[in-house]
Image: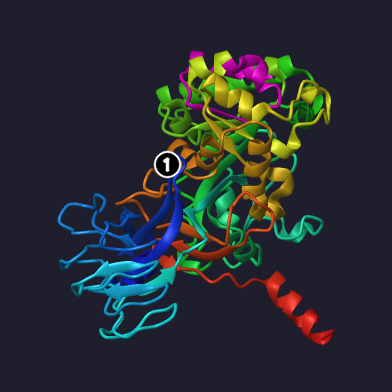
């Protein structure tokens, strides 16, 4: 956890988001009050219809959700709460204190950290008690967990046609498990704020360009030097077994059998190297000691092995390898995954897919289908959605990829989970990706349906801290719009 963010969250007052539609990926609450405190989601309180004492469309908050042990949470009616809110006068469309309102709340006691209305207003908030917590009116808006992009080159690829700014690939190195792509990660990249403005709060930065490309890392898009990831603590090993990946193997490239032979040989060498304690052996090893040692966590099942494979037979071969070697496998791409969906489910192997990529681009993807995410969901396969490595500059499109999956039959709930909670679970970050009490407050407040192209991310929080949505693209747009006014 970033020390600066932690200190800031401890000093900050709670944030109250009122009247907001909450979408968690498992449930939808049409109107709720959400309280963020100390970097966590403190409570989510559904706004239930008021009793007969409150006419027309009034609401009364009398319930609260569970909060971490030792904390009192929620919004209360008539009693003080640790983190709630209190209203001090009747309003036409706001918050009242001790009196019914037409379309608001009626609370009769002050709270320790919340907001208070002390004078009548038409549609706003008075100030009989100083407001210590930030209050946000979420009416007409949607709150979700922050989005997570799992196939990203943010921070390691700035301008693709300028090789000096591309640090995601080792040339002429089909097997480089010791390559740590996040050694070259730049948290000050101009690309990060653009992705964050699209609701992305975390990314999995991954290498590309080999059968075994190297390790990636988890990055929260805070955009400070202090947020630079520790490359010595890798998140996953990445590789690929597509025709393109096989062609990088030099003289033996092109034949899939040769690719699988090389992978099995390297894994066997890594096991032998560990058993020997690194001592010299009679036969030559396929890779250096440093490269083989990088595979130890993969052999132990501590690091997932993310392999890009599209053809059904390649996916089956990867499943067989994972079973034989007891590997923790994740399949990326999987254009023909619907043909082997039952096998993927049986093996409990997650897949990472890009809905907009489902076209027969090459011989690996001849059986691609637009409804791939829906077919895999129905088969019970764990699905993660991505914008793909080929679109690394547009991670902000992640929500639109999810919308495309929904348009082709995937359930809305599963699509939201596929860009929030599911990647967090698969990549061992269970405190993130979920909108529920006690979890980390990585949140996005949307102007409307997050899967619609016209919707904007109005506010973004990472670990409870509000993030700037300013970025170079907006600055350029403002500059040139001003010049043409």
In magenta, the rendered stretch is 314-341
Q: Is residue 427 above or below residue 52?
A: above
- Tell me residue 462's x, y (percent): 45, 61
Residue at x-position 56% and y-position 52%: 182
Residue in front for this viewpoint, 293 or 195: 195
Location of residue 479 (image quadrant): bottom right
Q: Is residue 90 left or right of residue 429?
A: left
Q: Is residue 190 above or below residue 330?
A: below
Q: Is residue 323 magenta?
A: yes
Residue in front for this viewpoint, 189 or 474: 474
Residue at x-position 47% and y-position 26%: 328
Residue at x-position 69% and y-position 73%: 474
State the residue position of label 1: 27
Q: How is the image coloured?
A: rainbow
Q: Is residue 29 left or right of residue 51?
A: right
Location of residue 86 (image quadrant): bottom left
- Disc 1 is placed on an element classified as loop
Q: How many callouts does the rendering have?
A: 1
Q: Main secondary structure of the magenta part?
A: helix
């Amino acid at each position: 956890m970033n020390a600066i963010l932690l200190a800031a969250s401890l000093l900050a007052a709670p944030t109250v988001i009122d009247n907001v539609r909450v979408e968690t990926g498992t449930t939808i609450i049409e109107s709720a009050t959400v309280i963020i405190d100390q970097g966590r989601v403190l409570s989510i309180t559904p706004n239930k219809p008021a009793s007969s004492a409150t006419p027309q469309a009034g609401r009364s908050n009398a319930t609260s959700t569970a909060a971490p042990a030792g904390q009192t949470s929620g919004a209360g009616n008539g009693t003080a709460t640790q983190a709630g809110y209190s209203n001090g006068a009747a309003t036409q469309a706001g918050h009242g204190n001790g009196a019914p309102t037409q379309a608001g709340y009626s609370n009769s006691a002050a709270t320790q950290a919340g907001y208070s209305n002390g004078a009548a207003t038409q549609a706003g908030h008075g100030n009989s008690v100083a407001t210590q917590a930030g209050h946000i009116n979420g009416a007409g808006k949607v709150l979700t967990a922050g989005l997570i992009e799992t196939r990203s080159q943010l921070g390691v690829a700035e301008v693709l046609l300028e090789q000096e700014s591309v640090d995601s690939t080792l040339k002429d190195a089909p097997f480089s498990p010791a390559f740590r792509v996040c050694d070259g990660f730049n948290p000050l990249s101009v690309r990060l704020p653009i992705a964050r403005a699209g609701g992305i709060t975390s990314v999995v930065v991954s290498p590309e360009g080999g059968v075994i490309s190297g390790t990636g890392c988890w990055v929260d898009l805070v955009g400070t030097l202090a947020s630079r990831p520790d490359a010595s603590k890798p998140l996953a090993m990445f590789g690929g077994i597509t025709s393109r990946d096989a062609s990088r193997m030099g003289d033996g490239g092109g034949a899939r059998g040769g690719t699988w032979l090389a992978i099995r040989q390297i894994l066997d060498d890594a096991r032998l190297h560990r058993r020997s304690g690194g001592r010299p052996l009679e036969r030559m090893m396929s890779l250096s000691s440093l490269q083989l040692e990088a595979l130890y966590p993969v052999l132990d099942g501590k690091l997932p092995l993310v392999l890009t494979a599209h053809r059904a037979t390649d996916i089956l071969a990867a499943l067989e390898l994972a079973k034989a070697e007891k590997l923790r496998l994740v399949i990326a791409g999987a254009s023909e995954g619907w043909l082997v969906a039952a096998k993927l489910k049986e093996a409990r192997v997650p897949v990472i897919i890009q809905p907009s990529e489902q076209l027969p681009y090459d011989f690996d993807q001849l059986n691609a289908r637009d409804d791939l995410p829906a077919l895999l969901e129905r088969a019970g396969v764990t699905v993660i959605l991505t914008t793909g490595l080929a679109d690394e500059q547009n991670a902000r499109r992640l929500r639109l990829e999810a919308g495309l999956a929904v348009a082709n039959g995937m359930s809305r709930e599963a699509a939201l989970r596929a860009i929030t909670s599911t990647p967090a679970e698969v990549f061992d970050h269970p405190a993130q990706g979920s909108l529920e009490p006690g979890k980390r407050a990585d949140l996005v407040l949307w102007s409307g349906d997050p899967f619609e192209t016209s919707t904007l991310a109005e506010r973004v929080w990472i670990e409870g801290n509000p993030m700037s949505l300013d970025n170079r693209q907006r600055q350029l747009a403002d500059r040139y719009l001003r010049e043409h006014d």
